[in-house]
Amino acid sequence: MELLEILWNSFKGSLHWFYRGVIFELPWHQNYFWGLTLISLLVWGLEIVFPWRKEQGAFRKDFWLDAGYMYFNFFLFAAVISGFYKLIGKGFSSLGLQLSSFSIVDIRSWHPLVALLVFFVVLDFVQWLTHILLHKFPLLWRYHKVHH
């Protein structure tokens, strides 16, 4: 029962954090909801001004579906998965370990903009690699082809 409580409390905490971002209760540099929204609008605007495909309109097929996936993946999925991170942390604690024991680099002393830049580069690489693997392995492809 304790495990379900950890999952539930983590999920509630993540949703509360998300809500606080939407209503501007978080500092601007922690407000990922509006940060994601503004960056997405900026990129969309650039896509309209400098289209990759000249015939593509401002609202391409599945535009709104992709927007929904973007928010789902960034916030709802994060809310769900955060509970599992808490469980992993609890499991490590029971073994006398901390998640920080597995850190390769301690970025807490880095300038926030440097840490953010490194985060985006690493995140983009991991997402690219994941996408390559989803196309390469038949078992993963069967799951991923729904997206295509």
Image: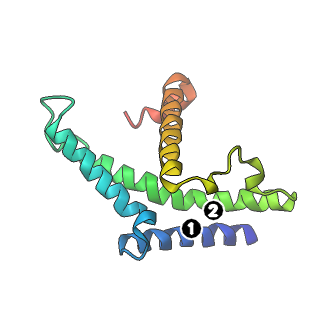
Q: What element carries label 2?
A: helix
Taking the spot 47% from the left edge, 59% from the top edge, the residue there is 76
**Crowdedness near tag 1: few (<14), some (14–19) or many (≥20) residues, C-alpha within 10 Å:** many
Q: Which amino acid does label 2 sit on?
A: Gly
The residue to which callout 2 is attached is 83
Taking the spot 75% from the left edge, 47% from the top edge, the residue there is 102
Give residue 137's position: percent from left, percent from top: 56, 24
Which residue is farthest right? Answer: 95
* Residue 30 to residue 53: above or below: below
In the depicted view, which residue is nearer to us: 27 or 24? Answer: 27
Residues under labels 1 and 2: Cα distance?
Answer: 6 Å
Q: Quadrant of the N terminus?
A: bottom right
Number of numbered tags placed on the structure image: 2
Give residue 129's position: percent from left, percent from top: 52, 31
Give residue 145's position: percent from left, percent from top: 43, 32
In the depicted view, which residue is nearer to us: 132 or 102? Answer: 102
Give residue 104's position: percent from left, percent from top: 71, 43
Taking the spot 47% from the left edge, 45% from the top edge, the residue there is 117
Taking the spot 65% from the left edge, 58% from the top edge, the residue there is 84
Looking at the image, is mark 1 or mark 2 earlier in the sequence? 1
Say whether residue 7 is visible: yes
Residue 57 left/right relative to 14: left
Residue 1 left/right relative to 146: right
Residue 92 left/right relative to 136: right
Q: What element carries label 1?
A: helix
The residue to which callout 1 is attached is 11
Q: Could you tell me if the residues under marks 1 and 2 are in contact, i.e. CB atoms within 8 Å?
A: yes
**Crowdedness near tag 2: few (<14), some (14–19) or many (≥20) residues, C-alpha within 10 Å:** many
Residue 42 left/right relative to 94: left
Q: In which quarter of the image is the C terminus?
A: top left
